[in-house]
Amino acid sequence: MRQVAVLGSTGSIGVNALDVIQRLNRAEGGFRVAALSTYSHVPLLQKQIQVFRPSLAVVGDEAAAKVLSRWARSRKIPLRVMSGVDGLVQAASAPAVQLVLSAVVGAVGLQPLLSALRAKKTVALANKEALIVAGEIVMATARRYGAKIIPVDSEHSAMFQCLGGRTGPGAGVRRLILTASGGAFYRRTGSLDQVGVEEALNHPTWKMGRKITVDCATLTNKGLEAIEAHYLFGVPLDRIQIVIHPQSIVHSLVEFEDGSSLAQLSHPDMRLPIQYALTYPDRKPSPVRALALDEIKKLEFYAPDFRRFPALSLALEAGRRGGAWPAVFNGANEAAVQAFLGRRLPFTGIPRLCRQVMNRFKKRPPPRDGLRGILEADAWARREALSFLGKERLSSETLTKGGVKPWIS
Ligand code: MG
C-alpha cells in the first residue's frame, strides 16, 4: 500500500487524481489516501473525506478548521484537522506518507514541497509555481536528500516520458520542444484589451482551474512551463523552443543530439500524466481513449506571437535572469490574474502590471542569496503589484462598458 497525500484535492488536478486513485484501487488496490487539503472548498473536501477516510485534513484557515473538526466529530470520523501552510507542511512530511501529490495553486506550495523533499518523499508535482519561484533550491534539495520529483504538468510529463527518466550529459538532449495550445485567444484577431473574464476562461482544449486558464490565455503559462522544464531537466532556456500546437495532441518533444526527436501523444486528459506520476515507472490501463490518428488527420505547429502575447517574453526574460526574477514575475502575475478575475484589471493589463513590477525590481538592490531573498522578493512583488492596482480604481462597470485605457505605461 502506498500512502499518498493529495495537496489541493478539491482543485481540477486534485479531483482528477482522486478519480485516478479510485480506479487504480478498484483494479488492483495499491493506494491509501493519508491526507487531503483544500484552501476553501470545505463541502467538497467533506465528501472526499467520507470516501477516502484520510487521517489528516488541511484547510485554509483556523475558522474552516474548526468547522471541519466539529463536522468530523459529529459523524464520528477520526480525523486530525490542521490549517494553513503549517498544515500543508505536516501533510507533505508525515512519516506514513510515501508519495505527495502537490496540486495547490501558487507559490504557497513551496514550503510543503521543500518539506516533502527533505523527508525523502517522492513528489508528483503539479504545482509549477513552487518550482518556478525557487527552482535551483528545490532541485538542489531533491538531489541532496535523494528525493524524486515526477512532473504532472502534461508537457513535462511528456518530456519525462521521452527522456525515460534520464537527465544530465549522458541523456544527449539537444533541445526541448514545448507545445502550447495557444489558449483562449490564439485564433482571435483585433485588440485583446476588452476581452472579458468568461472569454479568457474558455480554453479550447483543456478543462482546468481559473488561474491556469487565464495564464494559458496570456501565454504566461507557457513561459512558466519553459522555466519549469529548465529546472526539472537541467536544459538552458535558449535550448527550449515553444511551439503553438492547437490540437493539444503532441504534449511536447525531446530532440536528441543524434537528430532523433521523441514525442508523447495522447488526447488531452490530465488523468494520464497524473496516473503516470502515481504508477511510474509502471504503466497501467486508464480510461483515456486511444488515439485514432486517421480521425485526427492534422497536427499543426506554429511559432508563437511574442508581440501579441508579451507575457511570454516577460516570463522568459525572468527565467533567463534567474535568481529571484522568476519569483518576482510569478508574484506579480498571481496578483494580476487575481485582479483580472475580480474585474479590476483588463486582460492586457496583466502583462503590463508584470512589466511594471519587473522594471521596479531592476532598480532595487539585489535581494540576498538563498530562499530568504527569494521569499522577500516574492512578497515585495505582490505588494508592488497591489500598490499599482490600488492606484487605478477600475470598477467592473467601467470594464464591462468598455473604454478602459491602458493604465500602466
Ligand atoms: Mg501544462
Image: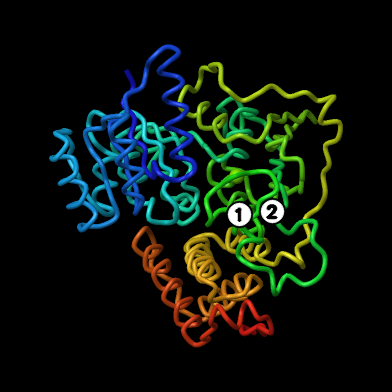
Q: Amino acid at mark 1?
A: Asn
Determine the image quadrant of residue 162: top right
Spot occupied by residue 36 in the image (x, y as percentages of width and height):
31, 39
- Please give the label number shown on residue 15: none
Which residue carries the number 2 mark? 183
* Ligand 1 has an atom within 8 Å of the beta carbon of the residue at disc 2: no
Residue nearest the observer in this picture, 402 or 3 = 402
Residue at image coords 51%, 27%: 275
Residue nearest the observer in this picture, 272 or 342 = 342
Residue nearest the observer in this picture, 85 or 214 = 214
* Ligand 1 has an atom within 8 Å of the beta carbon of the residue at disc 1: yes
Q: CA distance from mark 1 to mark 2?
A: 9 Å
Q: Considering only vertical position in the picture, is 28 above or below 188?
A: above
Residue at image coords 39%, 41%: 9
Residue at image coords 66%, 61%: 199
Q: At numbered mark 2, what does the secondary structure look like: helix, strand or loop?
A: loop
Q: Amino acid at mark 2?
A: Gly
Which residue carries the number 1 mark? 221
Mark 1 or 2: the one toward you = 2
Spot occupied by residue 123 in the image (x, y as percentages of width and height):
41, 35
Compared across the picture, whether 388 is left or right of 154 comes to left
Evaluate if marks 1 and 2 touch, with contact meaning CB atoms under 8 Å apart. Answer: yes
Q: Quadrant of ligand 1?
A: top right
Residue nearest the observer in this picture, 367 or 40 = 40
Density class for disc 1 (Cα within 10 Å; few <14, some 14-19, many ≥20) is many
